[in-house]
Image: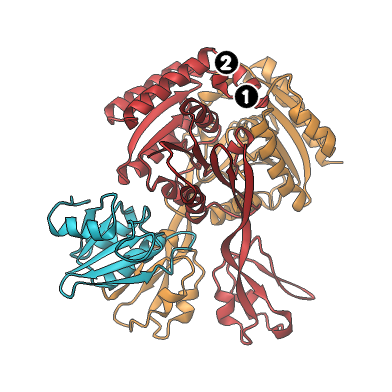
Chain colours: A cyan, B red, C orange
Amino acid sequence: MIIAVPTSTSGEKSFISENFGRCNFFYIYDTDTEIGKVYTNIYKDGQHGVGLRAAEFVLNQKADILITPRVGEKSLEMFKLSQIKIYECQNETVKDNITKFLNNELKELH
Amino acid sequence: MKQLLILSGKGGTGKTTIASAFIRLADAKAFADCDVEAPNLHLLNHDGQKESKPYLGMKKAQIKEDLCIDCGACQRNCRFGAIDFKAKYHIDPYACEGCAVCTLVCPTNAIEMINSIDGETTIFRGNRLFSTAELNMGSGNSGKLVTEVKKNLKDNLTNEELIIIDGSPGIGCPVIASLSGVDMVLIVTEPTLSGISDMERILRTAKIFKVKTAICVNKYDTNIDLTQKIETYALAEKIAFTGVIPYDKKVVELINSRRSVVEEDFSVSRAIKKVFISVTELLSI
Amino acid sequence: MQIAVLSGKGGTGKTLVSVNLARLAKDSIYVDCDVEEPNGLLYFKIPNIEEEIVYTKYPVIDHDKCIGCRKCTNFCQFNAMAFILGKVRVFKELCHSCGGCKIVCPAKAIEEKEKEIGKIKHGYHDSTEVFSGEMVLGEESGVPIIKALLNKVENSNKTIFIDSPPGNGCSVMESIRDADYCILAAEPSIFGLYNLNMVYQLTKNFQKKVGLVINKSTDDNLIREFAAENEVKILGEIPMDLELAKINSEGNFVSQISRLGTIFEDILAQALSEVSL
């Protein structure tokens, strides 16, 4: 399965971004290959509507899981069109959050 | 580290005065002013070294004169009346919405989209850390700028226990941007019909973001009936009602002499202290 | 003749001043351009008010014709379109109605339909004609509604009072487009002064004639000093007054009380004479 995480710096040691739409990077992790890729969030400098672009990106990566602190109304509407599940992150690194998720220690957000 | 955001919906309710009082009472070492269209917090708190950076807002269209052949296609297609012709075609930067349609229709590629300087962000570094910004006229506040003000604060933090954010008025994107990462929102309202209607609109947004919310009523004695209405509403909606603050012209006198309202012991400072205690209890600090 | 009432800061008394002046002036029109939080109708209570919807355009995608090239989503400067789960999705509230997506689409798959962005309410309260603009919650810009409001009154011979939005952004600029005179409402505090200066710069930029009203006036000379330094006329001062605050908070006209009414009558007289200079 594919897990998406908005991050502030790049890589698995990064902390999760406080913002979903304005995060600096997306970390996309494939549990089958155990490989994580980092993508720069090119839309983060938009004035408005960045959450939607972030949702667009995450869904186009075919993510099954999103781990994030929170999600706005409009982005949530988009996520509900898909099968993606959203989990609330904890204040730790990406790697730790993914590990916690795989151990069923994270709560669903919506 | 806890983040407290203070919002009001309507202007003039006393949000900045109360935010400033809280900063003093908490001895907060880090705070931000996200009310960027009319920033006021710096007037009460600005010790430390100032560092400003230009803020690049939205992109606006600009015509490269040497490439322009005066065909007028840009003006015909601009839906915002931003292009006029006085000897040559010219784009009014105040009216330009940044849609870039003119760049699409220009046959000679004579139009480019340039990042305009919409204002500046400032950080004060001293005993305390203070982040703020100011917008140039005609530019709008945006989630982008609020996020930058908050980011500037965060990037410079060390170990602060409590961060206080003076939020933007209104209910739109800037307010939503100020909500990220916040542990609690205090809505400062006033007992007027307009104040109540704006308070209800903000509450809807805060609910979607699942942020802990509290209300306090400022200038409550200007209308006790409406104050009671607000308290009843808070109870029904299960929102913490943290108290009421009376109206006293001494507040303006203190502010104008750049003193905090909590420096003197009178009805207003006592009431604010009570609200502050309730809020800190809710924040569990 | 159009008189706009502005303040940099919210809660300074724009509506207080504009509704009371409109009420006192003979044969006047009151236009509430604060479309995000219009409060004028809380004062001008009008039973049979007419409503007119204000529309702008938004794109609608014909998914059968759409070839998924994403030229539209890539072009949109406002993030109002995204390609999600194989389809172009439009986010109406973010759309600025620029028409760009329709132009870039190679498959003629985009048509424009109308969406409601707000409404204009219209009616009469005694001898005052009232227009109030209201923006739909979630919309980005009130400017199209303000434009529509001003178009309604542009050919009128009556004295028009514009209740401008707070701040100094593009909505404020639009609201003073046709103004012959601007009344700046300010309160004598350092906040009030700072914001007054911001909005004063705006009126100067557009070369508007300007006068000041000091609201919640005290002994403090902050605003009087500003007026003297910038050679701006003070049209009048409204005192800090608990009775006034209570009457105003309930949406009633303070000018009905005789001791307060004379203050507004003087402000009106001064403003009218300044405009004709």
Q: Give the alpha-carbon distance from disc 1 to disc 2, as whole Å.
A: 9 Å
Query: Residue at the location (71% across, 26% down)?
Result: C264
Residue B284 percent location from the top left of the image: 31, 30
Residue C22 is at least partly visible in this image: no
Q: Split into 4 quadrants, where in the image is the N terminus of chain C?
A: top right
**The image quarter in which residue C69 lies:** bottom left
Asked if residue A51 is positioned above or below residue C201 in the image, the reply reads below
> Residue pushed farthest left?
A103
**Residue linked to disc 1:** B259
> Residue pushed farthest top?
B266
Residue B35 percent location from the top left of the image: 54, 43
SS class, disc 1: loop
- Assess whether mark 2 and mark 1 are in contact (beta carbons under 8 angstroms): yes
Mark 1 / mark 2, whichever is N-terminal: 1
Compared across the picture, whether B114 is left or right of C35 comes to: right
Compared across the picture, whether B252 is left or right of C69 comes to: right
Query: Residue at the location (62% across, 31% down)?
Result: C13
> On the same chain: label 1 and label 2?
yes
**Residue linked to disc 2:** B264
Category of crowding for the residue at label 2, using alpha-carbon neighbours closer than 10 angstroms: few (below 14), some (14–19), many (at least 20): some
SS class, disc 2: loop
Q: Amino acid at mark 2?
A: Glu
> Depth check: C209 or B148 in front?
B148
Q: Amino acid at mark 1?
A: Arg
Q: Which mark is residue B80?
A: none
**The image quarter in which residue C232 lies:** top right
Chain for disc number 1:
B
Asked if residue B184 is positioned above or below residue C120 in the image, the reply reads above
